[in-house]
Amino acid sequence: MKKLVMLSVAAAFAMQGGLVLAAGTPDTGPGCGLGKLAFQNYPNAKTKGAQVVMALLNGTGGNTFAISTGTSGCTDDGRVWAEQKVTMFAELNSNALAQEMAQGRGEHLASMATLLGVPQQHHSTFFGMAQTQYTSLAQAGDLSAGAMVKALNEGIAANPALAKVALN
């Protein structure tokens, strides 16, 4: 195992010079970095074996530089986080969110409002809308995190006061 790690580290450093400056790499597997660049044109990059090697190469330490500078296929635009933060929060807190949506108030619901870009002064309007959306979700029998997020986004879009102020 030690030989494999050393070989991976040596290969990563040998390839780093030309690969670090590459851009526009396709989505071939685990994250970004040297592993992704090394396998960008490999026809079987989505296989488990190739992804394990990519992950090993990505874990060599050079990824810190790549992530912080936006090289090696890494980006610093935050798109993935921005698109997923609300859904991730809803999945992690779905039970509490469902309960608070039903009540029309609560800390988790306030956090959700903030994540959706609703300013603090409009949270009470958001809470009322969320309570209405909860009723629809409960009647439909779908209280999944995805359904909650969709319903809240639709509720914001349909509410003139919230649609004007929300960032999403």
Image (cartoon, helix red, strand yellow):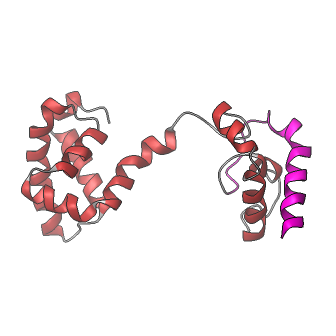
Q: Dividing the picture into quarters, in which one does residue 19 lie?
A: top right
> Which of these two is toward me, 30 or 142?
30
Q: Is residue 161 visible?
A: no
Q: Residue 75: image x %, image y %?
A: 62, 37
Residue 63 visible in this rendered orientation of the protein: yes
Q: Nearer the viewer, residue 35 or 47?
A: 35
Q: What stretch of residues is rendered in magenta?
A: 1-29
The C terminus lies in quadrant: top left
State the image coordinates of residue 18 (x, y, percent, origin top left): 88, 36
* Residue 149 lies in the magenta stretch: no
User: Where is 91 relative to 21, above or below?
Assistant: below
Q: Nearer the viewer, residue 128 or 115?
A: 115
| Image quadrant occupied by the N terminus | bottom right
Q: Residue at x 29, y 53 (%)?
A: 149
Q: Is residue 3 magenta?
A: yes
| Residue under the image location 76 percent in, 43 percent down | 62
Left/right placement of residue 64 relative to residue 152 reads: right
Query: Going by the image, does 1 lie left or right of 127?
Result: right
